[in-house]
Image (cartoon, rainbow, N blue to C red):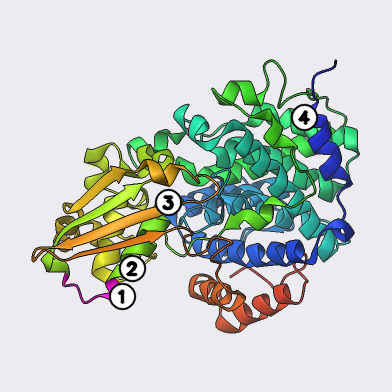
Amino acid sequence: MNPPEYTRELVEFLHALTPEQLPAEVMDRARYFLLDYLAVAVRGSQEESARCVQRMIRRNGASGCSTVLGTGIRTQPGPAAFANGTASHGIEQDDTHSGGSIHLGATMYSVALALAETMRDTTADDFLAAVVAGYEAAARIAMAVQPKEHYALGFHPTQTCGVFGAAITASGLLGLTTAQTQAAVGIAGSMAAGSMEFLAEGAWTKRLHPGLAAQNGMQAALLAQEGFIGPLHILEGRDGFLHGYSRNPIAGRLTDGLGESFEILRTAVKPHACCRYMQGPIDAILQIMRDHTIDSTQIATIEIAMLEAGWGIVCEPRAKKYHPESIVDAQFSMPFGAAVAVLCGAAGLDQFTAEYIASPAVKRLMDKVVLTKDARLEETFPREWPARVAIETRDGRRYEKSVRYPKGDPENPLTWDEMAAKFRSLAGAVLPADRCDLIIQHIADGKPAVLPSLCV
């Protein structure tokens, strides 16, 4: 009996996917996540990490028709996808697929927008279908390596798994054959990188990951278009991705239930400007503070039960998490996120700043945070990302709140109006208000392939 050919089966299904086969709900979510992507990418373009990439592009001679969002730069599709993917990940508010613990839109939309600007005959529906296919591929691959196992080896799935999704999205837009698409996916396997070592010192390299995935996946598709040959069994092969990037892969997740539903429907957005593992606990803290009159100076402890998969990302090493030195440190510090949520009643971009990192009041509250593990939280992870918080005051009062689905999850979503508000809040810092309104309307009307100007 021949072994399963997971790569071929996944590629054949995604290659054959047409807009007509996609439910209206899926197309609606694709537009919804495009608006979210543009919000974080346009605002993220102003971060110094993004500006480094922009300066590099200018220095190397920017020329082309693909837009670097939030700037006046037009360049070739590859550099544009790299710049926009990096920008969209810089403020830690991009979407996250729960089962794969992977940021999908930052990669897939970066590829699709950069290519669509060079292909004037791309329809809105074709654009969205290519993105949906990329989401499906990357999410399934991330679930197959298992997030906890993948993180344990030091890999970041947004780049390692995202590059395959980028190759699928690019292949769809370029009109590649099934064989060429499978070659592109095979080539992408040699471009799968992405280290979590950035956590050790608050480095910027994580912000590059979706940009690199987008650029490399596009490059893989362009090579395949020219006849370059890639391995046919890159996912399940003896030396393939699953075996190299996980101690306990589950290959069946690559193809189980293909077409029954779509992973874009299981993707969440982030209201708070920090790691996905911090979203649920922050929601719980904000709810407790809203429901009860608690003087922050009277708090004795803030006890937070955390998911084990996020423990080494936002809870340890203790010295780093309780004493962040940079904004990246703060974005991945549960004690910091908890402290600003209590003190400010919010955990957005205005709170993840150098001023709050240096704040004595924030430091005092961080010292009151007690981080714990709770086996009960693991029972539904990664299908759910639950959290539990208890705040005790000096006079003995105790307030508890459990969160099953953080705000932004598919089961607890931001409405379209709330998403539009997020867009105006973030992109409105870069683009004029009337253009923000025009972009929102354009996407709502189903015309995402040709958008109003996103340049400044």
- Residue wearing tag 4: 6
Q: Quadrant of the N terminus?
A: top right
Q: Is residue 294 above or below residue 401?
A: below
- Residue wearing tag 3: 275
Whether pointer 2 and pointer 1 mark residues with C-beta atoms closer than 8 Å, the reply is yes
- Residue wearing tag 2: 286
- Residue wearing tag 1: 290
The x and y percentages for residue 330 are: 32, 52
Mark 4, other Cα within 10 Å: few <14 / some 14–19 / many ≥20: many
**Residues under labels 3 and 2: Cα distance?**
16 Å
The x and y percentages for residue 225 are: 86, 36
Q: Residue furthest bottom?
A: 434
Q: Check disc 4 and report its element: helix, strand or loop.
A: helix
Residue at 19% in and 72% down? 294
| Magenta stretch: includes residue 200 | no
* Of pointers 3 and 4, the one earlier in the residue sequence: 4
* Of pointers 4 and 1, the one earlier in the residue sequence: 4
The x and y percentages for residue 282 are: 36, 60
**Residues under labels 4 and 1: Cα distance?**
49 Å
Residue 76 shows in this picture: no
Q: Check disc 2 and report its element: helix, strand or loop.
A: helix
Residue at 41% in and 57% down? 280
Comparing 174 with 57, the one in front is: 174
* Of pointers 2 and 4, the one earlier in the residue sequence: 4
Q: Is residue 413 above or below residue 79?
A: below
Q: Quadrant of the C terminus?
A: bottom right
Q: What amino acid is labelled 2 in the image?
A: Leu
Give the extent of the magenta segment. Answer: 289-295
Instruction: Check residue 149 in the rendering and tell me which mark sits there, or answer none.
Output: none
Q: Is residue 407 left or right of residue 328?
A: right
